[in-house]
Image: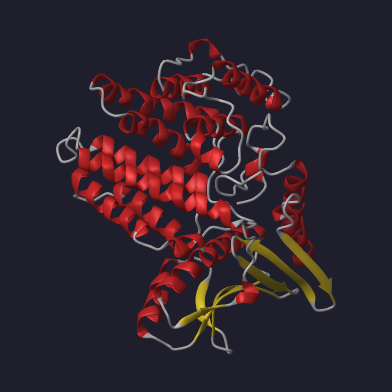
Amino acid sequence: MSLISRLFSPKSTKNSDPNLLFGRYSDAYKTEAQQAAWNRSLLLFEEKRPLDAYREMLVFLRDEAVNNVTWTEDEKGLRFEFRQGSRRITGHANRDTIKVESRIAWVDEHKVNFMRRLVEQNFKLRYSRFALSPDNCLVIVFDSSTRDGSPYKLVQAFMELALNADKQDDILLEEFKALRPVAEAMEILPIPENERRVKVQYIRQEIQAIMDALEKAQPDPNRYPGGYVYLMLGTAFRLDYLVRPEGYMMDVLERVFKTYFTKDDKSPAVKVEAMKKLFLKIVDRPDEALMTELYDTVSTFGINPAVGHDRIQSLMDAELPKMEWHLEQKHGESLQMAIIRYAMGYALYHCAPPPPDRAYLHLLYRITDYRFFQSLGYAESYHTPEGGLKKSAIEAAIKEVAEQWRGQFKKIKPDTNGLDYSSLPLFARSYLKMVRNLDLS
């Protein structure tokens, strides 16, 4: 949820294209200056200079592109603030103690249901805890003595607190009417109404495509649920990357993933039905409710680990062969594309791939979901007026990404000779094979 999404996207060949954000924030790729600050922080803490160590730790966390971390110092110590999604997190440190908190919601009534929810959440937290402040505000807080507050511990504690503050505020406010938002603690960047309406229409369209495929039942989802699992997971990944919802919808999409990946005795067919019900929870909400969860934010922490290109290669090797049955059986395009969209989405949702991999996956979204991008104001460069694939424009864009990252990845040389333009599923499969074969050493 930051400008890093733009940095990892291929440069547009059209100056008039909007510059929108796609994908979740990643802090996996730190600059050399940030890494140097981290090393200084560790040394200063070993020298028993905690405030100096914490100042360098804040330099490490600060993303200069988005101004996500600020701090001041005075005779009382170090005061700092950082942002995570819609939440502002504040902290104070002196030579003896450090405390960090984020205000979540005003509590009008002490209802048993949400108090029980918070107790359950506290059992899951390692460093921080939910609590009530003296002025009856629900907060999430972490505190420690500086003696025990190493930079390693603090970064983990800050991350846990920040991610839970950002996630739980919308969920709790949606579910419990005894809570009111703390407006002064919110940090959101509104997006234009037209963009939100386009995204809501896209959400409904893509979920309806799932329902249509299930109703058509070719093949029968009860006998052959595998393709529908990929269809649902791929759609959830795609909505998360392209739409970037917050709050309740983001939580429902996470529950879609958990429903399938949780190890239990439920069959794939049963899990398909459970995932279907979760998607229907989204479409049952009015447009206005969905639109309130569409906004831009600035963040400090991401949740995805950095991975090497070999991880992307393994993913493609494992998933792409599974397309064959759907192609041989001549199933509809949505099922033929399901494994492609799952592989792309998994790589972007669960990992922080090397920048060229991310850029190429984003470009494939531009090609496969071109009508969505057109609706957002992007020029259509990759399809003919009849809807066919435009080879020259696609290969020019592929070359452009390679040139953009050649300074950092000297051996990058995408081989476009194997691209198959005869249909969208075959093209997408050949494209991911091209990405898989990149040399990013």
In the rendered structure, the answer to whether residue 83 lies left or right of residue 32 reads left
Residue 48, percent from left and from top: 75, 64
- Furthest-right residue in this view: 75
Q: Position of residue 367 (x, y in %)?
A: 51, 29
Residue 213 versus residue 404 in the image, above or below: below
Using the rendered view, name the quadrant where residue 139 is placed.
bottom right
Of residues 79 and 154, the one nearer the viewer is: 79
- Can I make out residue 389 in this image? yes
Answer with left or right where residue 210 lies relative to residue 340. Answer: left
Q: Nearer the viewer, residue 418 or 54?
A: 418
Horizontal placement of 52 versus 24: left or right?
right
Q: Residue at x 48, y 44 (%)?
A: 349
> Could you tell me if residue 47 is visible in this image?
no
Q: Is residue 275 above or below residue 87?
A: above
Please provide percent x and percent y for residue 393: 60, 20
Could you tell me residue 352's position as x and y percent?
Answer: 55, 40
How was the colour assigned to the protein in this rendering? secondary structure
Give the answer, above or below, for where 280 lies relative to 380: below
